[in-house]
Image: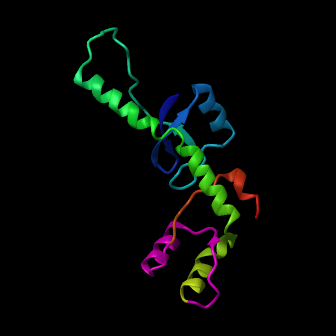
Amino acid sequence: MIVFNLTCSNAHKFEGWFGSSADFDQQQRSTMLNCPVCGCTQINKALHAPYVNTGSTQRTEKDEHRAQAREVEKQYTNVAREVAQIVEHLIANTEDVGNAFPEEARKIHYKETPERKIRGNASHNEVKELREEGIDVIALPIPKHRLSKTH
């Protein structure tokens, strides 16, 4: 596995795990990659310092720290798959109200319409306004290839 530090065109920083550098390149070209914060598909590798093996067999405190960090990272190797499963579950169990999301969320919150599980589109400002009104919403980027599928 290769871990790359990534950024989107909106300057959000995150990590990506890939089987190889070619896997990253292929996913980037096909726009399968998207920012977990905003959903942007313009993803680039950020600068990072790779580990260089100096050939020394003596383990330093820094080496121990790296080994511990690798163990922690192993816990998160399946996160992308789990997030994809969550997205699939949400798509299957919610109604897509599209751009009417803020209005529909308010109607449900203020009991103007029956309660139901919805998803849709909202700008950062709209999400902020909903939260200020006490309406619980979660911004969840859904990959482009899933947007056209309806349930």
Along the viewing direction, whichever of 53 and 49 lies nearer the viewer: 53
Q: Residue at x 57, y 26 (%)?
A: 21
Q: Residue at x 57, y 53 (%)?
A: 39
Q: Residue 131: percent from the left, percent from the top?
A: 45, 75
Residue 134 belongs to the span the image colors magenta: yes
Q: Residue at x 57, y 48 (%)?
A: 82
Up the image or down, 83 lies above or below 105; here it is above
Up the image or down, 113 lies above or below 82; here it is below
Q: Residue 53: percent from the left, percent from the top?
A: 37, 14
Asked if residue 34 shows in the view, the reply is no
Q: Is residue 141 left or right of residue 64?
A: right
Residue 138 belongs to the span the image colors magenta: no
Q: Residue 104: percent from the left, percent from the top?
A: 62, 80
Number of marks drawn: 0
Q: Residue 30: percent from the left, percent from the top?
A: 69, 39
Along the viewing direction, whichever of 4 and 94 lies nearer the viewer: 94
Up the image or down, 52 lies above or below 130; here it is above
Asked if residue 145 shows in the view, the reply is yes
In the picture as drawn, the residue positioned furthest to the left comes out as 61
Which residues fall within the magenta stretch?
A: 111-136
